[in-house]
Image (spheres, grey):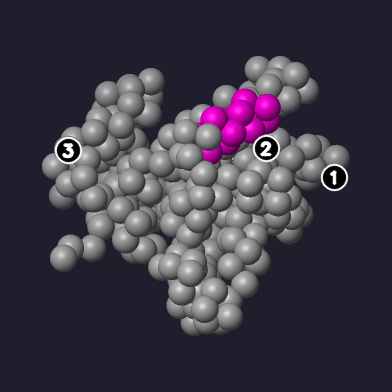
Amino acid sequence: MIPTLILRALVDGLLLGLFYSVIALGLALIFGVMNIINFAHGDFVMLAAYITWLVARALQVDEATPIAIVTIPAFFAIGIAFYRFVVRPLLGGDPLIQIACTVGIGFILQNVALMLFKAEPRSLPSLVLGTYVALGPVSVHLAKLVAGLASVVLTLLIHRMLTRTWLGLAIRATAYSEEVAKTLGINTDRVFMLVTGIGIALTGFGGVLWMSFGQVDPYLGASFALVSWIIVALGGLGGIRGLIYASLLVGVIEALTMTYVSPSVAKAVPFIIFIVATWLRPQGLFAPRG
């Protein structure tokens, strides 16, 4: 028999990993198709979390999840603007310039949030999703369960889009070779724009899910950005399956560390795993073999 405390930490870790997978998927799409190193990715999640909080307060509602109806299209539009004014000029450029520009965007978002909201954490008092449900011998926070299930559904939809639609074929062809895609008549500039829109829209969804069980402050984006890059690196750009495996691994390790060591140490352990895994398997822990 697995002790209840360990079982609960495992369940929490798996649900946290599923949540991480949605955010990391957006980062992986942008990096995998365009080779753009976007260090502002986590700050878009922070921005979405604040917008979720503001909309919930304005509408006088307690639940964050329905606000995804607003944030997903809004952040798709933000992603289009981000592509046109930031990403497009960086395509094919020096990686150091990409890092400098996206880090700069992240700092701008962080400091605007700090100016508007100060450093005080904000949260939503969820009345429905703030309860616990029994899953066998363990009790699970309902908001985390809903976030995990919603992450699975959205990930499956993205996977279906990439594998079963013309747009998905165009995205995969462009990721393989921009020149080959152009010879096939694919408008690669439009593909890049749509991929950026989808990737940033996923951060909008992630910000909503986070506010259903977490709290936001101006520095939230930095932790999400680093965790997302760890997941993408461990996944080895081996497709959605490798990304999910890496997300689950990071989530479980973080949850177990919070339970048995210290919450202050939990964020550091995935970095240790990342360093060791990179040393043992530089191409990514879950990259395809061969």
Relative to 130, 14 lies left or right: left
Residue 78 rendering spot, x and y as whole percentages: 72, 49
Residue 83 rendering spot, x and y as whole percentages: 66, 51
Q: Is residue 208 visible?
A: no
Residue 2 rendering spot, x and y as whole percentages: 19, 47
Asked if the stretch drawn in magenta spans residue 102, the answer is: yes
Per the image, label 2 sits on a secondary structure element best described as helix
Residue tagged by mark 2? 47
Q: CA distance from mark 3 to mark 1?
A: 50 Å
Under mark 3, the amino acid is Trp
In the rendered structure, find residue 59 and report the number of the disc placed on it. 1
Which of these two is toward me, 151 or 212?
Answer: 151
> Which label sits in the foreground, 3 or 1?
3
Q: Earlier in the sequence, mark 2 or mark 1?
A: 2
Q: CA distance from mark 2 to mark 1?
A: 18 Å
Which of these two is toward me, 270 or 67?
Answer: 270
Give me the residue at 33% from left, 46% from top: 233
Relative to 118, 32 lies left or right: left
Q: Give the magenta-colored segment's residue range.
A: 98-109
| Image position of 199 with respect to 255: above or below | below
| Badge 3 density bin: few <14, some 14–19, many ≥20, Cα 10 Å | few
Under mark 2, the amino acid is Leu
Per the image, label 3 sits on a secondary structure element best described as helix
Give me the residue at 33% from left, 26% from top: 268
